[in-house]
Amino acid sequence: MMKLLVAIFAVLSALPLPAGAAAPPGLPADLTSTDVSFRGAGGLELHGSVISPADARPGRPGVVLVHGAGTGTPREKLLPEAVAFARQGLSVLVYDKRAKGYSTFERSYPQLAEDALGAVATLRRRPGVDPAKVGIWGLSEGGWVAPLAAARPSSGIAFVIVVGANALSPLRQQAWAVAAGLRKAGAGGSLVGRAEPNLYRVIADGGLFPEPYHDPEPVLARVRQPVLAIWGVHDLLTPPRETPPLFADALEAGGNRRYTFRFFPQADHAAHLTPDGGVTRLPELAPGYAELVGTWVGEATSGRAPVAQVSGPAPVQAVGSFGVPPTAWWESAAAQVVALLLFLVAFGGYPVVAVVRRVRRVRRRAAGVPSVAARVVSAGGLVAILGGFAYLFHVIMTGGKLAAPGPMLGDRPVLWLALQAVAVATVAATAITVTTWRRAGTRGERVRLGLLIAGGAVFVPWALYWGLLLP
């Protein structure tokens, strides 16, 4: 049935729609759907659907679903959850996520929390919904947003449900997820231990990683509502062994012991079934997940929320997360840009001068005898730097769940080994070029080689920082 519903949604999503609206979900006969609109942060108009049982009773609970990461994610993305929860007797408001003010490089969790609060206020006004029994549900990134909304004074939120949520900062979570994906693919060494976390730190320093150091623990300490937290045993995007104790500590620090933690076997980050340890997400929810939500909401909204209850099998987490502190000045994004410009001038200038001399037909004796070592420094430095960054960005864009590091030699990606070999050759050639510089016959050639050597000298600490000169 769930696969059929998803197929129906795929067809509906292909139909032409009025601007700013989406088609109501194609639902089975036991459910109804009503389109709603409301104002989010900054007055942005958002659109959603309220899904309820066809025979809904008055005074029923309601829940607002908050998406995970993604720009403009349509409400259909959470159709399986909306259907399953509505069949437990809840009215479920699911809405299209904002695209304005949200992108890969820009987002604000407080802004997303304001959007969610607008949805909560809308659901509380729906006929048949008890306004005192409306809660919020957040998946993944929504696990940072939902507590922010619930912690607002007079939020009107009766309970909080999070799935695949994090008690770690977004930067630490993402760096762990990609590193874990690389290790799952068999990679190790300096690529995983040095280059990948350093790239995330530099990206964050450059303002290209939104909300990198958001601290969820103080927010959780302000949450007073009952909390249901769910993790799949095979969560590859959230450290499932580390997060729950931090979650519990933060809630208890604020005096809240009305929490229930549940781990589902054979389930992934979103508590959907997975056939391969979390890599592939099936449409079906983990068995018992929807029933748990229905039962728990009934208890929580009647004042009988369980106290400090934890159940389910132990989660699978092969390695722990690691710190990703802010960069020092010498490793900052600005310093990296300066170094890159120096390398482009030093390494790129050598062949450019050679071309200019050839065009101007400068005599070979005046120009000096071309140095093989100098050519290696020039070409090797450019390949190591530009190729290194290109490969690292490829790794982080494909990392998480199942990374794609390319062909492997042991636990080392062949491409990374090749870049390391080029880096070693560049350093060795720089040392040889020093001797060539001493024998240069003209002042112009000495300046040209001196600039190349300076680039090679700076390249050494740079390559060490990025792991190109480490095992």
Image: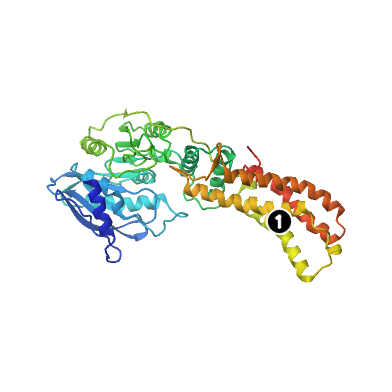
**Relative depth, front residue between 471 and 292:** 471
The count of marks equals 1
Quadrant location of the C terminus in the rendered image: top right
Instruction: Give the amino acid at mark 1.
Output: Phe
* Residue 120, above or below 43: above
Q: Secondary structure at mark 1?
A: helix
Residue drawn at the location 34% of the way across and 46% of the way down: 149
Q: Measured from the top left, where is residue 7 in percent x and y?
A: 26, 53
Q: Quadrant of residue 48?
A: bottom left
Q: Is residue 205 visible?
A: no
Residue drawn at the location 45% of the way across and 54% of the way down: 104
Q: Measured from the top left, where is residue 80 in percent x and y?
A: 26, 46
Residue drawn at the location 28% of the way across and 38% of the way down: 286
**Relative depth, front residue between 68 and 13:** 13
> Which residue is the extreme one toward the bottom?
360
Left or right of residue 26: residue 163:
right
* Residue 188, above or below 112: above
Residue under pointer 1: 347
Q: Is residue 229 visible?
A: yes
Q: Measured from the top left, where is residue 400 in percent x and y?
A: 45, 43
Q: Quadrant of residue 279?
A: top left
Residue drawn at the location 56% of the way across and 46% of the way down: 199
